[in-house]
Image (cartoon, rainbow, N blue to C red):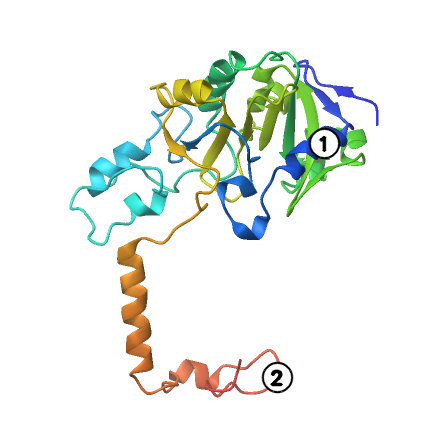
Amino acid sequence: MPSVENLSGARWSGSAGEAAWVRDRLSPFEVYEVASVVPGGYEAYARVLHPAAVPEDARPVRWRDVAAWSGGTVDRGTQFHSIALPPVRPAAEPPWGGSGPLAGTLHPPDAAVLAEVLRAATSTPELCFFCLWDGYGWERGASGLTPVGEPSARQPGPIPEAVLNGPRVRLPRRDYLLYTGQVEAVVPTALLGEGRRQAANLWWPADRAWCVASEVDLAWTYVGGSASAVDRLLGDARVEAVPAAAGDPLTRVEAWVQRWVDAGTEALLTTAWPPSPPPWVRSRPSWRGREVDGRDCC
């Protein structure tokens, strides 16, 4: 597939083989460690924490703000629920509203900071590769407003048909569309246009001096690179980042949650089972067309 240029100067690319080295350096996805989503073998790693979702014109709510509210701490193993859902809820209102951090994408200003920091850590800042997960459904476009009495018209999505029908970068559990450009092309507006918030999910320079991964199910982004590049990122107050290692688990369960689960399991094991079903279960028709008795419905 020939390259398709976007107005920003970024180019969609059919050269999916450029990502083969990434696949070769990933740990098995089932291991679910840092190196399962960003290539292993780098000197150092960092985890960039996505801020809680906020209106476009509001100050981003950082994890340290949430930790100050809940009395928690932010370290290399902290997840958002670690600080947002403490065992005892504080009396004060939480510092964020609505949902938590967006998964799978950098906060656009944070993406711009990473591009600035990482530009100095590669010899090829003008030639970088960017992978965008193909599961967002942009190929369907959106229904636009039309005059009263006229049928709605579906607007084209931001990705050209030639790209949607072209080759994919295929990595464990994820397929991606590929584009190229200078390092600053990671920001959403550089490729997808105004109003878009999705940054690249995986990106690296041609010299492979570093690699950045925003796994679609995680509320943070991993960066692998030289110790000096990672140190500069960790020391930049414009983003919130903590150290990481290739073998760190992607998720964890806090001790207090594990104690709660253990206590609940013990209670179930020492209580008569199965319990009597409530009346609404006894009388509710099942999808098989018979009455559900609450005991052998599963």
Q: Is residue 234 left or right of residue 152?
A: left
Mark 1 and mark 2 residues within 8 Å of each other at the beta carbon: no
Distance of label 1 from label 2 (alpha carbons)? 43 Å
222 vs 99: above or below = above
Viewer-nearest residue: 195 or 32: 32
Q: Is residue 192 left or right of residue 75?
A: right
The amino acid type of the residue labelled 1 equals Pro
The earlier-in-sequence mark between 1 and 2 is 1
Give the residue pinned by disc 2. 289
Percent across and percent down for residue 132 are 64, 33
- Residue displayed at 39% across by 50% down: 252
Any part of residue 145 in sight? no
The amino acid type of the residue labelled 2 equals Gly
Give the residue pinned by disc 1. 156
Alpha-carbon neighbours of circle 2 within 10 Å: few (<14), some, or many (≥20)?
A: few
- Residue displayed at 36% across by 85% down: 275
Report the residue that reaches farthest toward the left: 91
Viewer-nearest residue: 127 or 135: 127
Name the image quarter holding the N terminus. Answer: top right
Report the residue that reaches farthest toward the right: 1
Any part of residue 228 in sight? yes
Q: Secondary structure at mark 1?
A: loop
Percent across and percent down for residue 183 are 58, 16
Viewer-nearest residue: 246 or 265: 246
Mark number displayed over residue 252? none
Q: Is residue 124 left or right of residue 119?
A: right
Looking at the rendering, which quadrant does residue 71 occupy? top left
Percent across and percent down for residue 49 are 40, 33
Percent across and percent down for residue 127 are 66, 15
Q: Secondary structure at mark 2?
A: loop
